Image (tube, grey):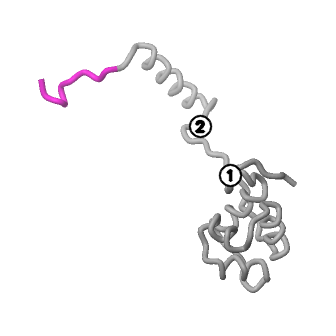
């Protein structure tokens, strides 16, 4: 028997659930694709970034290492010379809300 002639391996229960989901979708009870968008991370000031680092109780060098950015970048953010963007802003937001996500140790949550 060739691969295309092989009968798919699934249970009757799987087929029944799939058919019910198709019927629910056709009736407008559910959508085929759902996704909850999260709000974009807001930009941060140098003072806010410095407060995150202070809350983590780490040096600028360690903070930069935790964020996987050059130390000069982290320092420039704190001084307000540059602003983080994109993924860096989201990572800073995570560090602010859940410090342990960055350090792997329990931290203070403000």
Point out the residue furthest to the bottom here: 81
Secondary structure found at label 1: helix
How many labels were placed on the picture? 2
Return the x and y of residue 31 as percentages of the image width and height. 59, 37
Q: Nearer the viewer, residue 32 or 11?
A: 11
Q: Which residues are magenta?
A: 1-9
Which quadrant of the figure has residue 80?
bottom right
Q: CA distance from mark 1 to mark 2?
A: 33 Å
Q: Earlier in the sequence, mark 1 or mark 2?
A: 2
Q: Position of residue 53 (x, y in %)?
A: 78, 66
Q: At x 81% / y 76%, what residue is drawn?
A: 46
Which is more toward the observer, 69 or 103?
A: 103
Front residue of this view, candidates 47 and 54: 54
Q: Dot 1 corresponds to which residue?
A: 101
Where residue 44 appears, as percent x and y from the top left, is: 79, 71
Q: Which residue is mark 2?
A: 31
Q: Is residue 74 above or below residue 93?
A: below
């Amino acid at each position: 028997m060739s691969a295309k002639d092989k009968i798919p391996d699934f249970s009757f229960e799987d087929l029944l659930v799939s058919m019910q989901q198709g019927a629910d979708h056709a009736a407008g009870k559910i959508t085929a694709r759902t996704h909850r968008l999260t709000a974009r991370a807001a930009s941060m000031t140098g003072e806010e970034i410095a407060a995150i680092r202070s809350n983590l109780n780490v040096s600028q060098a360690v903070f930069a290492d935790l964020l996987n950015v050059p130390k000069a970048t982290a320092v420039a953010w704190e001084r307000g010379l540059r602003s983080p963007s994109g993924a860096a802003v989201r990572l800073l937001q995570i560090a602010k809300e859940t410090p342990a996500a960055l350090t792997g140790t329990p931290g203070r949550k403000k």
